[in-house]
Image (cartoon, rainbow, N blue to C red):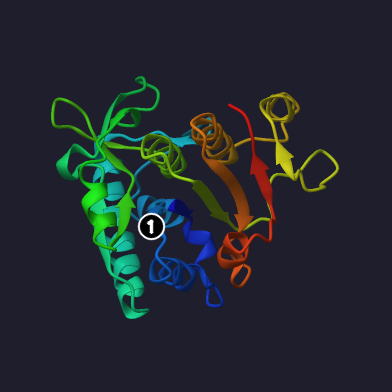
Amino acid sequence: MTIVIKIGGSTLGDNDTSLQDIVHLAEAGQRPIVVHGGGAMITDWLTKLNITTNFVNGLRSTNPDALEVVIAILRGVVNTTLVTQLTQLGGRAVGISGVDNSLIQAEQYNSDLGLVGKITKINNDLLIPLLDNNIIPVIAPIGIESLSQPLNINADTVAGEIAASINAEKLVFLTDVDGIMDDSGALVPTLTVQTSNALKEAGILKGGMIPKVDAGFTASKAGTFVHIINGTLAYSLQQLMDGNLSGTTIKGG
C-alpha cells in the first residue's frame, strides 16, 4: 500500500511519534512517501532577514529574496533533519525536492504570488524505484518551471498531487488540530465538497486549511482515501492505519 503522509512542522513536538509510525509502516511492507512543509521556520528567517512576505488564500507570496530562504530552509534544514531522524529510527530514507529529476513541474500562478508554483505535472519515475527498494522518499515542496526557475509550492498541494498521480491508497495530513471544525467548533467527521464550500463561504474554513482541503479533494477524486488527523497525538498515524478512524475524512472532489 502506497501512503502519502504530509507532515507539518507544528506536529513534530517532543512527544510526537509520527516519524516512528512511518518507519514502522515501512518495516511492515507499506510504501510511505513523506511530504513536508516548513512554514513557521521560513517565516522566522524571513523576519530575521527583514524580507517582507504575505499570504494570499493560504499561499505565501514569494519574491526572489524570499525564494532563497524558502529553498534553504525546506531543502537544506527541514528535509535533512527529517531524513536524519528517520534514519536514526531505523528507516531507509532519501531526501529530494521537486526540482530533482523534474519531479514536480510547475508554472507561476500570477504576479500577486510571485515565484509560487501551480503544479502542471508529477514525474513519478523518480519515486517508483525508491519505493520498490523499500526507501522512504522525503520530499521538499519546491517545483521547477520549464525555464529552470525553482518555485515555492504549498506542501499540502504537493501531497495531494503526488497521491493522485501515483494512485496512492491513502493520503494523510498530520496537523496540530483534531480535523475540520464546523461553526459550533464540533469536528466534521466527513467533509464533502458541498460542506467545504459552505464552510468557506461562512469564513470558517480559511487560511492554510484551504489548500489542505483542496489538495484532499484532488486526491479523493483520483480514488485515494484522504484523512486529516491530529499528528501531535501519540501513535495517531499508526492507529489510523490499524483502522481506528479519527479526525476528518475527505470524500468527493
Category of crowding for the residue at label 1, using alpha-carbon neighbours closer than 10 angstroms: few (below 14), some (14–19), many (at least 20): many
Q: Tell me what residue is drawn at x 61 percent, y 64 percent.
A: 242
Q: Disc 1 marks which amino acid?
A: Arg
Count how many numbered circles sit on residues in the image: 1
Q: Position of residue 245 (x, y in %)?
A: 69, 56
Q: Tell me what residue is drawn at x 39 percent, y 71 percent.
A: 27
Locate residue 114 relative to residue 168 in the image: left or right: left
The residue closer to the viewer here, 97 or 191, is: 191
Locate residue 194 relative to residue 170 in the image: left or right: right
Residue occupied by mark 1: 31
Q: Is residue 194 above or below residue 100?
A: above
Secondary structure state at the residue bearing disc 1: strand
Q: Position of residue 224 (x, y in %)?
A: 51, 39
Q: Position of residue 176 (x, y in %)?
A: 61, 58
Locate residue 165 relative to residue 149 in the image: left or right: right
Q: Quadrant of residue 115?
A: top left
The residue closer to the viewer here, 153 or 220, is: 220
Q: Tell me what residue is drawn at x 17 percent, y 25 percent.
A: 146
Residue 186 seen in this snapshot: yes
Q: Quadrant of residue 16?
A: bottom right
Location of the C terminus by quadrant is top right
Residue 72 seen in this snapshot: no
Q: Position of residue 108 (x, y in %)?
A: 31, 24
The residue closer to the viewer here, 73 or 217, is: 217
